[in-house]
């Protein structure tokens, strides 16, 4: 459901009595499109979340914590200057427009007594937060607009605040259901439709089609203009507006709607906190997906380059493998110079005494003599021979990097929270294999809410037959569990030949049964790239036999004295 005027009106009706005379004691800006006002009222602390994001715009009380940046942005500093420590004297809406007005009065941080007004416009991508004085002169705003840049009104410091244009009717001006029906019938001809939802949403301010659809569903009526249906809807909307103690938010699949139930009374601030959880959950899901896709793109770009580099290395190795051929060419020419005309030619045919004197055609550089060609072949032989050792080392390094990045891709696809992604991002920052210098990375880093210590301790815990089992969710956690948390007599498990988590079975000086180890092996399989496969081998050994080579990639270990179990 869209956050329309009905929802906005219902929220304000819930909070206005609770927030009146409340003192603004905190103001912070978690990100560039959100402001949090901390209000102390009637012995309780509240947090008013004002969000101007084009997808999640809203104003409601929140219990979900948001990060407080170390350095406050300019608009946040302006709000602190003018309204922090003042009291809220009024909260209201302009009928069903998606605008909230909050009036403040008191001594600000400069010890000056003042009257200020915060105007919250919740209109999709044009959502804004505007601070004005008592004469409606704009002091500052979160977003600035000018007539010169194409806007129909000025929103910047010093200009007079004007309400947004609205050519729709005000529902509060309708006297009864008969007038309501007459207006709808008249507009149905102009709109050339009989859809109640379309007619009402196009006629009246602040009522969305989704709201009407949900009301029709609750009333069990068709979406067609009839006098009886119109009367039912008018009564329903009036109940939503004036019997607020019986109005609720109800979730329908991945959406929600306002409903009226005269047989039920809601809890205080029920709509506020419903929407708070609903939109916070959507924000987290979207933030997680954006973060995950960004990290995947970062890895895949680097992986593509490494694979291209590996192709070139393999081509070079194939060329190096032909080094002996150039040595043979040089020897045959040198040993037969006495019978070769020392004139420039493009090829020469000689007996190959390494192959029963079968004839071999040797291609030559026609710009130089055969003797110089022989020297050129020997030089190329030495060059390829020396290069072979280098490219073999280079190939191992590139293959190790590719293998490591594939393990990172598995971790990203297995991540279940932003905290998990933070751990992976921190790991990437600590390695030189991926360098992230984009502006987007700085934004992600700025909005991160966790520390590296939190990500290290975000591993999974299970209880199996009374034993504690720990599972790493990324390479750094795997290292941490294996080298810092686990003791020598604990049992380490890992799926063989697949990327996966390190699993630690804490023995606590006890000897687990084979059945317990088998259950832990199943956990190791479930937390690996082979989780959908059958008959997977899981190796296990005591932690004392697991070693991490120096300068190795995160999560990379070698182990001995292992035993294996097959998980079906």
Image (cartoon, rainbow, N blue to C red):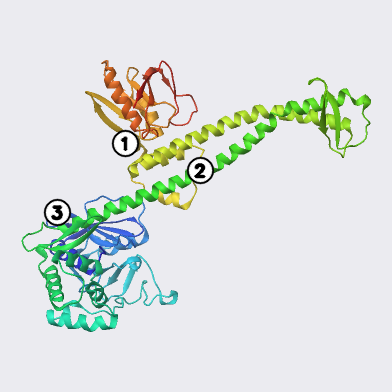
- Callout 1: helix, strand or loop? loop
Percent x, y of residue 74:
37, 61
Which residue does the image show at 33% across and 30% down from the upper left? 471
Question: Looking at the image, which is closer to me, 461 or 230?
Answer: 230
> How many other residues sit within 10 Å of disc 2, few (<14), some (14-19) or many (≥20)?
few
* Residue 229 placement: quadrant: bottom left
Side of 264 relative to 250 (left or right): left
CB under 8 Å between callouts 3 and 2? no
In the image, residue 560 sits, relative to residue 282, either above or below, namely: above
Percent x, y of residue 188:
25, 80
Mark 3 lies on residue: 44
Question: Looking at the image, which is closer to me, 223 or 177?
Answer: 223
Mark 2 lies on residue: 435
Q: CA distance from mark 3 to mark 2?
A: 47 Å
Q: Quadrant of the C terminus?
A: top left
Query: Which one is earlier in the sequence, the residue at label 3 or at label 1?
Result: 3
* Residue 248 placement: quadrant: bottom left
Side of 365 relative to 86 (left or right): right
Q: Between label 3 and label 1, give the one nearer the viewer.
A: 1
- Callout 2: helix, strand or loop? loop
Question: Looking at the image, which is closer to me, 545 or 41?
Answer: 545
- Callout 3: helix, strand or loop? strand
Which residue does the image show at 38% across and 42% down from the upper left? 421
Query: Which one is earlier in the sequence, the residue at label 1 or at label 2?
Result: 2
Which residue does the image show at 36% across and 33% down from the upper left? 531
> How many other residues sit within 10 Å of disc 1, few (<14), some (14-19) or many (≥20)?
some
Which label number is shown at residue 79? none
Mark 1 lies on residue: 458
Percent x, y of residue 182:
17, 83
Q: Between label 3 and label 2, give the one nearer the viewer.
A: 2
């Amino acid at each position: 459901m869209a956050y329309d005027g009905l929802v906005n009106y219902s929220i304000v009706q819930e909070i206005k009595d609770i927030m009146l005379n409340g003192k603004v004691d905190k103001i912070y800006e978690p990100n560039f499109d959100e402001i949090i006002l901390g209000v102390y009222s009637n012995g309780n602390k509240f947090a008013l979340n004002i969000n101007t994001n084009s997808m999640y715009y809203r104003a409601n009380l929140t219990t979900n914590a948001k990060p407080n940046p170390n350095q406050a942005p300019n608009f946040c500093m302006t709000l602190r200057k003018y309204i922090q420590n003042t009291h809220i004297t009024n909260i209201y809406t302009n009928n069903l427009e998606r605008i909230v007005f909050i009036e403040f009065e008191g001594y600000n941080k400069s010890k000056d007594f003042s009257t200020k007004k915060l105007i919250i416009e919740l209109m999709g991508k044009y959502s804004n937060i505007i601070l004005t004085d008592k004469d409606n002169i704009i002091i500052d705003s979160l977003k600035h607009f000018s007539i010169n840049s194409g806007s129909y009104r000025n929103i910047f410091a010093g200009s007079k605040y004007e309400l947004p244009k609205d050519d729709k009717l005000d529902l509060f001006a309708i006297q009864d259901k008969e007038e309501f029906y007459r207006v709808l019938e008249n507009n149905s001809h102009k709109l050339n439709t009989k859809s109640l939802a379309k007619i009402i949403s196009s006629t009246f301010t602040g009522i969305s089609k989704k709201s009407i659809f949900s009301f029709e569903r609750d009333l069990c009526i068709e979406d067609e203009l009839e006098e009886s249906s119109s009367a039912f809807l008018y009564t329903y909307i009036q109940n939503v507006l004036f019997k607020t103690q019986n109005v609720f938010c109800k979730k329908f699949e991945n959406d929600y709607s306002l409903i009226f139930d005269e047989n039920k009374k809601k809890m205080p601030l029920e709509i506020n906190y419903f929407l708070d959880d609903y939109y916070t959950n959507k924000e987290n899901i979207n933030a997680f997906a954006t973060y995950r896709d960004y990290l995947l793109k970062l890895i895949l770009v680097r992986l593509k380059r490494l694979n291209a580099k590996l192709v070139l290395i393999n081509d070079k190795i194939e060329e190096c493998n032909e080094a002996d051929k150039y040595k043979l060419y040089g020897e045959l020419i040198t040993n037969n110079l006495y019978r070769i005309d020392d004139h420039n030619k493009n090829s020469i045919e000689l007996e190959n005494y390494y192959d029963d004197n079968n004839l071999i055609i040797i291609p030559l550089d026609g710009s130089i003599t055969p003797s110089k060609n022989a020297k050129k072949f020997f030089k190329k032989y030495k060059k390829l021979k020396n290069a072979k050792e280098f490219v073999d080392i280079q190939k191992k390094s590139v293959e190790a990097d590719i293998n490591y990045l594939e393990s990172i891709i598995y971790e990203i696809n297995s991540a279940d929270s932003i905290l998990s992604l933070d751990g992976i991002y921190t790991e990437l920052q600590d390695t030189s294999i991926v360098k992230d210098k984009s502006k987007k990375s700085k934004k992600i880093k700025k909005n991160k809410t966790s520390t590296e210590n939190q990500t290290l301790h975000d591993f999974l815990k299970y209880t199996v037959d009374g034993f504690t089992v720990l599972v790493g969710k990324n390479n750094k956690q795997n290292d941490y569990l294996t080298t810092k948390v686990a003791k020598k007599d604990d049992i380490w498990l890992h799926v063989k030949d697949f990327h996966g988590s390190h699993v630690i079975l804490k023995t606590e000086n006890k000897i687990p049964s084979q059945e317990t180890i088998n259950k832990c092996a199943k956990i190791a399989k479930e937390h690996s790239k082979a989780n959908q496969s059958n008959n997977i081998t899981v190796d296990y050994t005591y932690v004392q036999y697991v070693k991490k080579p120096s300068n190795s990639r995160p999560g990379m270990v070698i182990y001995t004295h292992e035993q294996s179990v097959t998980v079906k």
